[in-house]
Amino acid sequence: MPIRSWDIFCTIVDNYGDIGVCWRLARQLAQEHGHTVRLWVDDLHSFARLAPELDPTAERQRLAGVDIRTWQPASADAPFDAPMPHDVVIEAFACHLPAPFLQAMAAAPRKPVWLNLEYMSAEDWVAEHHAMASPHPRLPLTKYFFFPGFARGTGGLLRESMIGASRDAFRTSPAAHAALWHRLGVKPTPDALKISLFAYANPATPALLDQWQHGDLSIDCFVPQGLAATQIEAWLGASMQPGTSHRRGNLVLHGIPFVRQEHYDELLWACDINFVRGEDSFVRAHWAARPLVWHIYPQDDDAHHIKLDAWLTRFARAGVAPDASAALREFWHTWNGYGGTPDWAALYAQLPALTAGMDRWQRQLQHLGDLAANLVDFSENRVK
């Protein structure tokens, strides 16, 4: 039976990562599949950084074809005026649905498909647990665990149908590049290597900036507002507010605004290498088909290192040159707190091979299908 409508519940944990994924998914379901989508979000102020047209004070509004509602997930028993559930209900990243909404799901004439959209991982166990069913202990409902991933047997990654064509058209358009730099309020240095730097606060950042400053290569580094920009201000001794630029040796640092998602994609397309953090920007950097450096979200006892190494292992198997893979692994390890100092020269020497390897890798990932379409297919197969 066809699926036509969705409820997506999201809590914003680290400011942008969770809502970044949910907002992209909601728009894709509405715009590419023509479905009705209701997106429930607990923090509209953080959400508005990604979607500036959003009114952070409104309890209900419509944007980009998506019905946006507010909710307060602090307590499962908190008051909640539950509407009739849609065909599919997604609780993103185990955010726990309100008890009144669960009751409405159980009472619906046609029970909705209930999905827990999990965090992305390249670990082997993901395919084993993807699509597992978990019956509710009291209600006539079954929840399914849906894992984004990098291998067959997972849910794949978010990828709009036209993103490759849009990227390629952008790269061949000087006017599109000029419009991007004008929007960001910067003037890139001619012929400089372009780097985007979006990261959490990182003890390795000063050492990397020192290497860029004193190196032989001309580098333009574009830094959105956030934790990395604040840290760089301390190293720089000057403001990194949007529109400011500072030269230190062969390095020019450009402060840029925190931009909406579509414009962030263009920044990734315009750069030669992208430093990204968390989950949403990490996935977007794949579709840019350029080398990337991932600052994974830190977890207690360095549990995130397992997840990081799982991706590096899959990437190494994707046909990238062994020396390039080794240089990337070493750089990612130092960037993510394994110890030592990032070796920029070793990474830069492998940039052509990494560029070719990244392009090959993202083409392979396309064969998994995109996450939104895979969610639709999975849900339609479970409607009774």
Image (tube, rainbow, N blue to C red):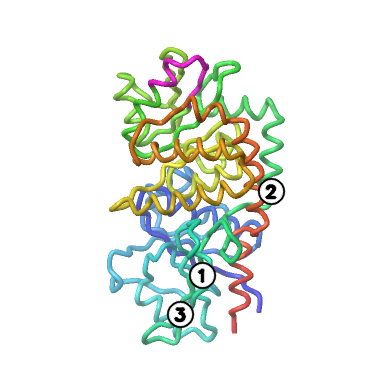
Q: Is residue 32 left or right of residue 264?
A: right
Q: Separation of disc 2 and disc 1 at Cα?
A: 31 Å
Q: Quadrant of the N terminus?
A: bottom right
Q: Which one is earlier in the sequence, the residue at label 3 or at label 2?
A: 3
Is residue 172 rendered to the left or right of residue 84? right
> Which secondary structure, mark 2?
loop
Amino acid found under the numbered disc labelled 1: Glu
For the residue marked with disc 2, what is the amino acid? Met
Q: Is residue 67 above or below residue 248?
A: below
Q: Residue at x 51, y 60 (%)?
A: 67
> Which residue lies under the disc numbered 3?
105
According to the picture, the residue beneath numbered tag 2 turns out to be 162
Identify the residue at horizontal 29%, vertical 24% (top origin).
234
Circle 2 crowding by C-alpha within 10 Å: few under 14, some 14–19, many from 20: few
Secondary structure category for the residue under label 1: helix
Q: Nearer the viewer, mark 2 or mark 1?
A: 1
Quadrant location of the C terminus in the rendered image: bottom right
Q: Which mark is residue 128?
A: 1
Return the mark for residue 18.
none
Q: Which region of the structure is painted magenta?
A: 210-221
Q: Residue at x 70, y 29 (%)?
A: 173
At label 3, the amino acid type is Met
